[in-house]
Image (cartoon, rainbow, N blue to C red):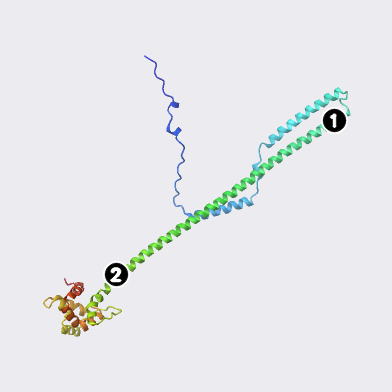
């Protein structure tokens, strides 16, 4: 039997995660976000951040390099080692000259020690000055960054406020549009109602115009209470128009006469009593008018419960 095949390693099986580019997850929208509250909060934060940046001390020490003391100590140690080496060289030279331990050697060592002391002091001062300058620049840069962040926060607050204003303006326009549509419906309903109330007048306009008479509508439509005089008056005229329209043998003309006496408006009752006989004669000569008048009469009869 041959040797078993080696198991595949993890490197030979690249996964989709190693080859795919990382995509950040989208930010979920906040629930109950209010642009007006956001703009007010951003404005307050911007004002507070600006005041702190302007009034608070710089705190330069917080930005100082913490390793400056170690660097200065290391430099001082190097200078001290150089001084000792120089002192040894000076002692060797004095020994070679036969002046070791003399006053001249002491003066030379004192001068050399002073020069190395000044060098060490100047070096330490320069390093501290450099550290302070860098810390000051870092503090000023941090203050500028904070001012920039406060300004950006104020800009975001202004943007949120403008967004709120735009939303309110759009809502106002939508409200005006809906109000206009409702007003148009109201006007259309008024027009339909006016047409319905004016239909009796329009139905009588053609026969009355043929007689040369125009009824004058009243401002109110009060119903008549049938009395003995009314029945006698219309009974004497026998409701000529209704008899002509329906025929003398059809009881519908009596039903319409009942509406005229008891329920018709004042102006209609007066006009019908005055011009009814003349209109009936016109209808008799022009039978086509029955097609115009009869629907009106049928509607009034049915309104009282007749079929």
Give the answer, above or below, for where 225 lies relative to 31.
below
Local secondary structure at mark 1: helix
Classify residue 75 as left or right of residue 251: right
Q: Which mark is residue 192?
A: 2
Question: Relative to the observer, which residue lies in front, 110 or 282?
Answer: 282
Give the answer, above or below, for where 18 lies relative to 250.
above
Tell me the CA gap for discs 2 and 1.
125 Å
The structure residue drawn at horizontal position 34% and vertical position 67%, both measured from the top left corner, is 186
- Extreme top residue here? 1
Q: Quadrant of the N terminus?
A: top left
Residue 137 image-quadrant placement: top right
Q: Which mark is residue 51?
A: none
Q: Nearer the viewer, mark 2 or mark 1?
A: 2
Is residue 63 something that shows in the picture?
Answer: yes
Residue 91 image-quadrant placement: top right
Give the answer, above or below, for where 27 lies relative to 208.
above
Question: Relative to the observer, which residue lies in front, 200 or 57?
Answer: 200
Classify residue 270 as left or right of residue 162: left
Give the answer, above or below, for where 118 lies relative to 185.
above
Q: Quadrant of the C terminus?
A: bottom left
**Mark 2 or mark 1, which has the lower sequence index?**
1
List x then y, in percent, for residue 64: 66, 41
Q: Which mark is residue 108?
A: 1
Classify residue 190 as left or right of residue 96: left
Classify residue 182 as left or right of residue 135: left
List x then y, in percent, for residue 281: 17, 81
Question: Relative to the observer, which residue lies in front, 237 or 126?
Answer: 237
The structure residue drawn at horizontal position 24% and vertical position 77%, both measured from the top left corner, is 205
How many labels sit on residues? 2
Local secondary structure at mark 2: helix
List x then y, in percent, for residue 299: 20, 72
């Amino acid at each position: 039997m041959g040797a078993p095949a080696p198991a595949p390693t993890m490197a030979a099986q690249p996964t989709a995660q190693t080859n795919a580019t990382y995509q950040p997850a989208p930010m979920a929208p906040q629930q109950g976000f209010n642009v007006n509250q956001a703009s007010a909060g951003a404005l307050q934060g911007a004002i507070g951040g600006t005041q702190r940046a302007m009034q608070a001390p710089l705190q330069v020490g917080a930005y100082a390099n913490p390793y400056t003391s170690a660097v200065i100590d290391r430099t001082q140690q190097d200078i001290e080692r150089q001084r000792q080496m120089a002192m040894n060289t000076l002692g060797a030279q004095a020994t070679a000259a036969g002046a070791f331990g003399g006053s001249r050697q002491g003066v030379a060592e004192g001068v050399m020690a002073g020069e190395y002391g000044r060098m060490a002091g100047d070096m330490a001062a320069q390093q501290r000055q450099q550290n302070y300058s860098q810390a000051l620049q870092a503090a000023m840069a941090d203050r500028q960054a904070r001012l920039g962040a406060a300004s950006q926060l104020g800009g975001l607050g202004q943007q949120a406020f403008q967004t709120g204003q735009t939303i309110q303006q759009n809502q106002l326009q939508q409200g005006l549009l809906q109000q206009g549509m409702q007003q148009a419906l109201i006007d259309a309903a008024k027009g339909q109602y006016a047409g319905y109330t004016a239909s009796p007048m329009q139905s009588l306009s053609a026969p009355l115009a043929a007689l040369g008479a125009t009824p004058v509508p009243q401002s109110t439509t009060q119903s008549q209470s049938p009395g003995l005089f009314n029945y006698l008056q219309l009974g004497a005229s026998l409701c000529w128009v209704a008899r002509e329209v329906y025929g003398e043998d059809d009881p519908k003309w009596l039903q319409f006469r009942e509406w005229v006496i008891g329920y018709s408006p004042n102006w209609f009752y007066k006009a019908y009593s005055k011009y009814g006989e003349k209109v009936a004669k016109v209808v008799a000569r022009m039978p086509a008018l029955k097609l115009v008048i009869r629907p009106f009469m049928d509607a009034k009869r049915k309104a009282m419960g007749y079929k």
